[in-house]
Amino acid sequence: MPANPAPLRILQPDDWHLHLRDGASLAAVVGATARIFARAIVMPNLKPPVTTVAAARAYRDRIVAALPPDASFVPLMTLYLTETLAAAEIERARDSGFVHAIKYYPAGATTNSESGVTAIERAYPALEAMERAGVVLCVHGEVTDPDVDVFDRERVFIERHLSGVVARFPELRIVVEHLTTRDGVDFVRACGPHVAATLTPQHLLYSRNALFGGGFLRPHVYCLPVLKRETHRQALVAAATSGSPKFFLGTDSAPHARGAKENACGCAGCYSAPSALELYAEVFEGAGALDKLEGFASLHGPDFYRLPRNTGHVTLSRRDHVVPAELPFGDTTIVPLRAGETLRWQATLGSDPIFQPPPGN
Ligand code: DOR
Ligand code: ZN
């Protein structure tokens, strides 16, 4: 048996793409992220969506109130881009100190995107105001045109829409969220330093084969953008582990109750928060690039968002443990990513590795 690798100590990471929901669901999930992550960019796709700074402030206060007693987690808030978002609201966002980005959902692309943008040109005045104010644009990069194959939606979005936005607003800082394709990686690499991307654990770990594993439909790995071919997954792993500051951690942890996933019309989203850092560590170890994990998880994100890096640390220790089959979720339950499976790494807050009994005990 090979000896366990030494515990890995990295600066405390942040999650640059997170869904926390609201009410009882929020209270059920926020602690999982706050266990390890110092901050997270919190998505605004509530019902109704968070479209004003006042609504973002109230949501932030509900998140803080739902935190476990000793947690020191800071939610970084976002607004939901609409075609009518006023320049004055964007300036208020910049001045707020707690709204850090505005999220662009193409209308109909995913969960609670009904109020999103029907044609990006209609939001150009808002993008211009964001470019001027220095507010980051987070993009869900998929076309919704029913004639486009679901596996091509990201590539076509880049060709039809995103390349035009980047050319028209050269100073606008853009995060292409949950990148899923080689085409997306190539695009982000070819852009200037104001264009970056987040990568999720599920897109780094799984190809689309996982959706049909063993001949069964697997709702808990169904998310949007949908998982892609293995060649795309390999391109994502290469990007994440390359050390490029353009790629950083964003889980897109998207909690849905078990019954909403195991359903004839199952919701999109993987609930990865309880094991997120451990899952990324597995990816980086598999690529022989654990030395690049800290940059991806803890440095590139704050640098892009122009926020200070964290000062605390987390420790990743090699310790087999089984992910719970399900977890409480309000008055129902939720199935975390990798439920019932054994993970090799375990993350703990602080510099000291968790206690590991000596071999033979
Ligand atoms: O799978 C997803 N779930 N993708 C998204 O873009 C949204 C998210 C959610 O909110 O459930
Ligand atoms: Zn998301």
Image: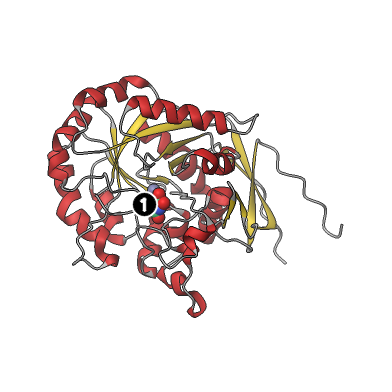
Residue at left 44%, top 70%? 211
10 Å crowding of disc 1: few (<14), some (14-19), many (20+): some
Q: Position of residue 113 (x, y in %)?
A: 30, 48
Where is mark 1, residue-wise?
A: 111
Q: Position of residue 127 (x, y in %)?
A: 19, 35
Q: Position of residue 52 (x, y in %)?
A: 31, 29
Callout 1: SS = loop
Front-most of residues 173 and 271: 271
Can the viewer see residue 205 in this picture?
no
| Residue 102, quarter of picture | top left
Front-most of residues 34 and 361: 34
Residue at left 49%, top 75%? 213
Task: Please identify the residue farthest to the right as the structure is shown.
Answer: 361
Front-most of residues 73 and 325: 325
- Label 1 beta carbon within 8 A of ligand 1: yes
The image shows residue 64, relative to residue 43, as above or below, that is: above
Q: Is residue 190 left or right of residue 357?
A: left
Task: Please identify the residue farthest to the top as the structure is shown.
Answer: 95
How many numbered marks are there? Answer: 1
Image quadrant where one finds the C terminus: bottom right
Task: Please identify the residue farthest to the front as the structure is shown.
Answer: 331
Q: Amino acid at mark 1?
A: Thr
Residue at left 48%, top 69%? 218
The image shows residue 314, relative to residue 163, as above or below, that is: above
